[in-house]
Amino acid sequence: MFDSLDKVDLDKLGDYMASLQNREDGSFFGDHGGEVDARFSYCAISALKLLNKLDKIDVVKARDFLLKCQNVDGAFGGMPGAESHAAYVFCCVGGLKMLGDIDLIDRDKLGLWLQ
């Protein structure tokens, strides 16, 4: 598919990814089977950002879900209340950065956790 994005129906792709968003809490399902965690939010936000299709999702709820994954230690888990893990830090911080909301995290606490 290198250099062939013109062959992809971007609206249809964006609609599919948007259909995976949980409208109640803003999270994303990995597929229609129902598994949810911050990895899927990162993947959906990343793809939609690259395709310039973020307008197809509720970005405020997507942001709020990622922020709820931040723990008292400053790091992030895969779900609200889940144990902090460096991979989820990557997903949540990356997702928040792409949404333009990186300033909402507690950088000092996160920095201490990452040391």
Image (spheres, helix red, strand yellow):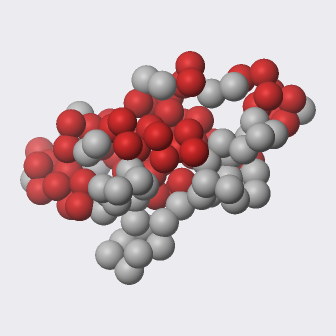
**Residue at horizontal 11 percent and vertical 49 percent from the top:** 11
Q: How many marks?
A: 0
Relative to 106, 8 lies left or right? left
Quarter of the image where one finds residue 103 = top right
Residue extending farthest to the bottom is 33
Relative to 51, 64 lies left or right? right
**Residue at horizontal 78 percent and vertical 21 percent from the top:** 108
Q: Is residue 81 above or below residue 64?
A: below
Please say whether residue 8 is visible from this viewpoint.
no
Residue extending farthest to the front is 24
Q: Is residue 103 above or below residue 2?
A: above
**Residue at horizontal 48 percent and vertical 47 percent from the top:** 65
Instruction: Quadrant for the C terminus, please.
Output: top right
Closest to the observer: 81 or 35? 81
**Residue at horizontal 40 percent and vertical 58 percent from the top:** 28
Please say whether residue 23 is visible from this viewpoint.
yes
Relative to 60, 17 lies left or right? left
Q: Position of residue 110 (x, y in %)?
A: 76, 31
Closest to the observer: 63 or 115? 63
Instruction: Quadrant for the N terminus, please.
Output: bottom left
Quarter of the image where one finds residue 89 = top right
Q: Position of residue 63 (x, y in %)?
A: 44, 38
Q: Is residue 61 above or below residue 9?
A: above
Q: Is residue 18 above or below residue 54?
A: below
Q: Position of residue 94 (x, y in %)?
A: 54, 36
